[in-house]
Every structure is written in C-alpha cells, then in structure tokens.
Image (tube, rainbow, N blue to C red):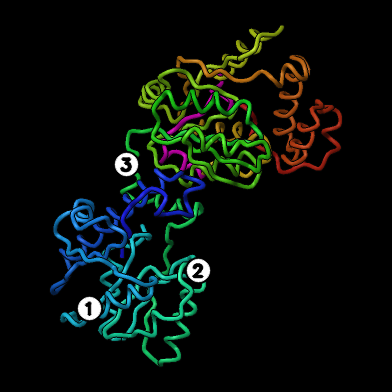
Amino acid sequence: MLKYPRPGAVKTRLIPALGEARACELYRALVRHTLATVDEFSRTAVGAVAVEARVADAPDAAAARAWIGDGVAIREQGEGDLGARMERAVGVALAEGASSVVVIGADCPQLTAAHLGAALAALRENEIVLGPAEDGGYYLIGLRRARPELFRGIAWSTDAVLAQTLAVVRASLAECHLLERLRDVDEPGDLGAWAETASAQAAGRGRVSVIIPALNEARALPHALESARRGNPHEIIVVDGGSTDGTREIARAHDAIALSSPRGRTAQMNRGAVIATGEWFLFLHADTQLPDDFTSHLRRTLVAPGVVAGAFEFALAEDFPGRRWIERATNARARRRQLPYGDQALFLRRETFRGAGGFRELPIMEDYEFVRRLRRQGRIAVAPAVALTSGRRWRELGVVRTTLLNQAMILGYHLGVPPARLAAWYRRRRPLRIEALAGMETQPALPTLR
C-alpha cells in the first residue's frame, strides 16, 4: 500500500524535523528499501508469489510506473479510508485466486524477507497474522479469507489501531498469530530505525554527518551552519535543547534536520548520532565555524594509520588581550597530549562512535571524558586547518579567570567531584576553591590524567 511521493503530502509528521523535500526523499528511500525486501523474499520463497503495488494519488499510470519500476503489478487504491482500501485490495486478490494475502506499507525499515516468510508460514495454521508496530499500529496483516470486519470502525493513524483490531479478532474467535514487534518510521523519534538499515548507511557511505547541539544560539548558529554547508556534507543535524529564540527555525531555514531533545549537550549529541547516516560523524558547537574543505581534511586525518578520531586547530574569532596565548596553549595541549575539546569540532568514524558507546551522560566534561576514552583505542590527531570559535567566555570573565575555571573543572573531575556539582560551579562562573574540594561529597576516583 503506497502513496505517490509528493513533497508535503507524504511523511507529514516528519516535515517539522526534515522539511517537505527531505521527508519526501526519505519516503522514496523507504519504498525502494521495501520493494527490495519483497523482491528478495519472492525470489527465495517456496511456491508462487505475486507482488502488487496499490498506489494512491498518482497523477497517472505512467507516473506510477516510472516511480515503482517494472516487475511489479500496479493498481490504484481507489476511494475510501485506509481500511476500505485495504479491504478492497484483499478482496480482489482472494477473488483472483490467491490462497493467502499479506498487506504491508513502506513505513517499516526493520521488515525483512524473513518476516514475510514467517507471516505466510503462520497463515498455514492461522486465519489471521498481524505484525505489531511500536507505535500501536501494525506493519503487516495477513489473511486466508476475506475479513471485512477487520477494516471497519478502526481509528486509522492512531495508537489504537492494533488494540482495536485485536478486539475484533477476539470477538470473531479467529485464530491469530502475532509476529515480532517492529518500529515504523512516522515520527522524528523513529528515524533511528531507518539509520540502522543497510540502505541508509549505503547512502551515507563516504559522507560526513555534521551534528550540532544548540540552545538559544540564534546569533551564532547561522555562521556555523553556513560553514558546514560549504563542505557539502551528507547531512547537517541540529539538535535543539529547548531554545526560545528561534534557533530551531533558523536550522530549518538553512535546510538542516531540526530535532528536539532534553536539554544537555550529551543528550543532544547522542540524539543526533542516533539518526545520523553518514560514514563519519563531526560534532560541531553552535558557536564554532568549520574550515573550508573540512571534509577533505577529515578524510585525510582519519585514514592515517592508528588514528581513531580527530579535531581541528583552535582559534578564537575575536581579538582581545591574551587571545594568542589561549590559542597556543590549547593547540599545544591538543597535539602533545591528544586532548582536543569539543570547540575544536571532534570527528570520528560512525563505527568508532558506536563502539565507544557514544558520549556518557554527564552534565559537563562530556567531550573531555569521551576523548580520554578514545585515546585508549588509538591516536587523536589534529587536522592542519582551523576551526574558529567564539571567544565570548574569555571576554565575559577574562582570560585569567576563565583559564582558572577550566583548570579547576579538570582538577575537580580527577579528584572525583560529582559532575553535577562541577556543572553547578561552572554555571555560576566561579573558580572552585581547591581547598574546598576535600570537603565535598565525591564519586569513585577516576583514572589519573596522563
């Protein structure tokens, strides 16, 4: 059961995050993925399998054929709600001699040829087969004979579809088999299911996903987005932590994927990584601008032997006393100790990020902790290109005070001060008094800084 792909008319609940064009392209990709799955099943199934695409809203038969391709019978869905259209499709197939009928959509990237085989196998012993979806609907229904009551009086496109259908099944005393529960892709929270497919990862092979956590960054974000766009990445994902200044709208205006997440840089970056489909991930602060041709620098850095991750050289956008000293000290630390921070735009392979378990749920020091974990796997390299970051922290607090605050955070972290307490101190923009650390409640000691 397919709907002709028109921007603004398909995957409408994804449009706030993806935009009309990208939501439509995702739907096209889901259809291609589903047709490939059905083709794989039909080529290996025992017995004859007929495949039919029931298409809604196509401008004409030629347009439908150009979209679907050859090898699949195409028919119009006809009038009525989704239930009426499915009832009609099942009835026609049975009337034309099918011994059993399985109806699916193109919304479930987790559906495999094995699921289709399990559905037809279950229909040998049961009158009805249902594939439950995580959102309360179903991704598959299989029947051996007409059951019009299953398609009438159902609140389609709601989380009550499966429950209402099962109530009808129980009332009819029919034998029903439930398949494995899978996830459809209807809401932004479902996009991770698509990102895990081979189809999605093939589309992102050799490409970069730029992930930007943001919170009330309306002033700085456009510059970060423009710098990212110049590198022609596979996708730019802005994860908003609850901004009130139009940050999310700016992301959409720059053709970025715009997601929402609980506030906190860790949660926001991990949220973006879940749906990212590029082969390489680059985590960019909203007040940092990437160098020109950053994708080439990224690739050359990561293919070097022993390198597991990288970052760019550090530079400040504003000029103020002490600026050059900060830049030299930061770059020396990043190169000699392999400890770049998040404002240098950390980048790494997708599989490296997944293998490391992503960023840990820390309210502060998440990039520091992540890089130290990565160092145990290999070298952290610094690419010979500059990421330009805002100097607002140093301008607001002064060079000496900001430096002392940063060093106190590192010292407190290694002394075992709970990250939540460190974050509270950091928000107050006051250096920790070292003599007070001993009296604080601490967490288990962390490894010594090397």
Q: Residue at x 74, y 32 (%)?
A: 412
Q: Secondary structure at mark 1?
A: helix
* Residue occupied by mark 2: 158
* Residue occupied by mark 3: 203
Q: Position of residue 135 (x, y in %)?
A: 49, 65
First along the sequence among labels 3 and 2: 2
Residue neighbourhood size for the residue with mark 2, other residues' Cα within 10 Å, grouped as few (<14), some (14–19), many (≥20)? few
Q: Given this view, does label 2 or label 1 mark the residue nearer the observer?
A: 1
First along the sequence among labels 2 and 1: 1
Q: Given this view, does label 1 or label 3 mark the residue nearer the observer?
A: 1
**What's the CA distance linking mark 2 and mark 1?**
26 Å
Residue 364: give its label: none
Range covered by the magenta-colored residues: 336-357
Q: Quadrant of residue 214?
A: top right
| 344 inside magenta stretch | yes
Residues under numbered marks 2 and 1 in contact, where contact means CB atoms less than 8 Å apart: no
* Residue occupied by mark 1: 92
**What's the CA distance linking mark 1 and mark 3?**
37 Å
Q: Position of residue 91 (x, y in %)?
A: 26, 80
Q: In this image, 97 relative to 237: left or right?
A: left
Amino acid found under the numbered disc labelled 1? Val
The answer to which of 267 and 353 lies nearer the viewer is: 267
Amino acid found under the numbered disc labelled 3? Ala
Work out which quarter of the rendered image holds the N terminus and state it: bottom left
Q: Position of residue 286 (x, y in %)?
A: 58, 29
Q: How many marks?
A: 3
Work out which quarter of the rendered image holds the C terminus and state it: top right
Q: In this image, 368 relative to 424: left or right?
A: left
| 399 inside magenta stretch | no
Q: Residue at x 45, y 91 (%)?
A: 171
First along the sequence among labels 1 and 3: 1
